[in-house]
């Protein structure tokens, strides 16, 4: 059941609220007020008998024999009988059969019999005791909160908070100011930004990795969502597709160029049964990724190393396949990174990539389009973003035989969602991460983080990092909605068998 709710993106908070409301209404409607008092029923029936006896004794005899008015067996102490639920006009009243009429009844010792509110003899039953209902409510709410805490979303949020608290002992988030300076066109020119790409990208992932893992999972990329898919199944299908394009055998050696914390590497390794080496320029991601691989029992087939993909630390003709998922966009020069990939790839082997690119819809004279481009670059650690045609030409110029080049974002997703739907602003709190992009939360969340920084619950720079990531998210969403940007320009190239 929980997996179904998670697949439908239902917020655990919403689940708890619904359970609480149900429990509340159960509690206030089970105090016995819905039952008919036996005292009132007996009095009413006796009144009807008296009226009939006065008008016609024969009718009274008929009344006593009417099928609809079964008399209940007399009580051992000869107390008044109670008529059944149905009356002569066919209306029905719910009556607890066997309840005693309180009319003139006494205990054997002559003392008045204590009765409950609904006419039962004796003390009020636990079933109709309001305090019992509230205890039921309490335990149901406790059970609901345990269920909510057990969901991955809540556990991930608690884990994210713990990581931010732990980060207060490091200076990773202090790099936000130098990162913002590198992305500020008034302070840093493009050529200087490209020269400082290593600092730019490493600083970005020092800041963004924990936010990404919390809000997106261990695979830092987009995927269109097809009919019947969950968010996570679409991510997995997206990775399996590019892994399948490599055409490798079991035991092959694959390179993940720009691996993040290794989510795709672990999934593709399991899918292809190959060994995957991941490379990232960020030391924190290497430590985190290898820790996750060990926790998931994948350390024997997935290894993450620190390095620069503009200067790959591997020998020539080493890998049976290379892939990159939304990663080589961080390179200052596409020819440089593709050439390095060509070098380490075995002759006849395949390179496949999803690339971030501007599309044919981009118009540099359009102010909104320029803003989208800059927002994506600043919010996602890119020195500069280029057109699809430049990436395709760079692959061919490196010596690859181009097998395919197309925008995978344009694939048919009828009945599903486009890749940017998770970033679309919404006021529905159970739709994440879109909820954080609505205008209200967009403004409140950084203020909340600033307050937590002030009392040292989270490291200094967390609020500025959130603002930077929010801007990138809005840029990507607007880029996808207008069609000027794609995060999945698919290119598949083969290194010629005769290449050296």
Image (cartoon, rainbow, N blue to C red):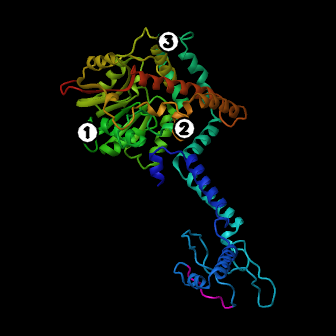
Foreground residue, 292 or 408? 408
Question: Is the residue under label 2 in contact with that under label 3 (CB below 8 Å)?
Answer: no
Magenta segment: does it hold 477?
A: no
Mark closer to the chain start, 3 or 1? 3
Mark closer to the chain start, 3 or 2? 3
Please name the predominant secondary structure of the magenta segment in the image. Answer: loop
Question: Label 1 neighbourhood size at 10 Å, few (<14), some (14-19), many (20+)?
Answer: some
Q: What x and y, as percent, mark residue 10?
A: 50, 45
Q: What x and y, as percent, mark residue 109?
A: 80, 90
| Quarter location, residue 449 | top right
Question: Is the residue under label 1 in contact with that under label 3 (CB below 8 Å)?
Answer: no
Question: Label 3 neighbourhood size at 10 Å, few (<14), some (14-19), many (20+)?
Answer: few
Q: Which residues are magenta?
A: 69-76
Mark closer to the chain start, 2 or 1? 1
How far apart in space, not on screen, are marks 2 and 1 (Cα)? Answer: 44 Å
Q: Secondary structure at mark 1?
A: loop
Foreground residue, 381 or 467? 467
How far apart in space, not on screen, are marks 3 and 2 (Cα)? Answer: 42 Å
Q: Nearer the viewer, mark 3 or mark 2?
A: 2
How far apart in space, not on screen, are marks 3 and 1 (Cα)? Answer: 40 Å
Residue 36 in the figure: left or right of residue 498: right
Q: Quadrant of the C terminus?
A: top left
According to the picture, the residue beneath numbered tag 3 turns out to be 192
According to the picture, the residue beneath numbered tag 2 turns out to be 428
Disc on res. 248? 1
Is residue 456 shown to the viewer in this render?
A: yes
Determine the residue located farthest toward the front in the rendered image. Answer: 55
Q: Secondary structure at mark 2?
A: loop
Residue 112 in the figure: left or right of residue 245: right
Foreground residue, 27 or 167? 27
């Amino acid at each position: 059941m929980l997996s179904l709710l998670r697949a439908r993106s239902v917020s655990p908070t919403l689940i708890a609220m619904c359970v609480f409301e149900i429990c509340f209404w159960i509690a206030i409607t089970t105090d016995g007020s819905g039952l008919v008092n036996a005292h009132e029923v007996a009095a009413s029936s006796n009144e009807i008998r008296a009226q009939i006896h006065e008008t016609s004794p024969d009718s009274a005899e008929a009344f006593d024999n009417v099928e609809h008015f079964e008399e209940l067996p007399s009580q051992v102490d000869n107390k008044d009988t109670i008529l059944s639920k149905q009356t002569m006009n066919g209306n029905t009243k719910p009556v607890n059969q066997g309840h005693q009429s309180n009319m003139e009844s006494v205990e054997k010792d002559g003392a008045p019999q204590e009765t409950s509110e609904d006419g039962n003899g004796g003390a009020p039953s636990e079933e109709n005791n309001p305090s019992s209902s509230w205890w039921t409510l309490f335990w149901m709410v406790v059970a609901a909160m345990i269920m909510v805490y057990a969901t991955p979303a809540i556990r991930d949020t608690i884990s994210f908070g713990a990581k931010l608290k732990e980060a207060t002992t490091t200076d990773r988030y202090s790099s936000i100011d130098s990162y913002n300076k590198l992305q500020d066109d008034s302070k840093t020119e493009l050529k200087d930004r490209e020269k400082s790409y290593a600092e730019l990208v490493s600083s970005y992932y020092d800041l963004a990795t924990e936010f990404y893992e919390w809000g997106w999972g261990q695979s830092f990329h987009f995927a269109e969502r097809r009919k019947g898919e969950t968010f996570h199944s679409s991510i997995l299908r997206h990775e399996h597709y590019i892994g399948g394009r490599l055409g490798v055998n079991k035991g092959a050696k694959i390179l993940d160029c720009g691996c993040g914390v290794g989510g795709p590497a672990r999934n593709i390794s399991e899918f292809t049964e190959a060994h995957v080496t991941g490379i990232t320029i960020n030391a924190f991601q290497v430590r985190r990724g290898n820790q996750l691989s060990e926790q998931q029992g994948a350390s024997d087939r997935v290894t993450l190393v620190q390095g620069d993909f503009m200067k790959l630390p591997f020998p020539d003709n080493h890998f049976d396949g290379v892939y990159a998922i939304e990663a080589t966009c961080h390179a200052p020069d596409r020819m440089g990174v593709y050439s390095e990939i060509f070098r380490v790839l075995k002759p006849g082997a395949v390179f496949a990539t999803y690339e971030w690119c501007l599309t044919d819809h981009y118009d540099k004279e359009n102010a909104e389009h320029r803003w989208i481009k800059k927002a994506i670059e600043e919010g996602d650690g890119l020195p500069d973003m280029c057109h699809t045609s430049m990436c395709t030409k760079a692959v061919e110029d490196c010596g690859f035989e181009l097998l395919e080049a197309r925008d995978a974002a344009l694939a048919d997703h009828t009945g599903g969602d486009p890749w940017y739907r998770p970033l679309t602003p919404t006021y529905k709190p159970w739709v994440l991460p879109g909820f954080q992009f609505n205008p209200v939360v967009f403004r409140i969340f950084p203020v909340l983080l600033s307050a937590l920084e002030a009392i040292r619950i989270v490291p200094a720079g967390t609020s500025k990092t959130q603002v930077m990531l929010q801007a990138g998210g809005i840029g990507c969403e607007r880029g996808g909605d207008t069609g000027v940007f794609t995060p999945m320009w698919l290119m598949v190239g083969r290194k010629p068998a005769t290449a050296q």
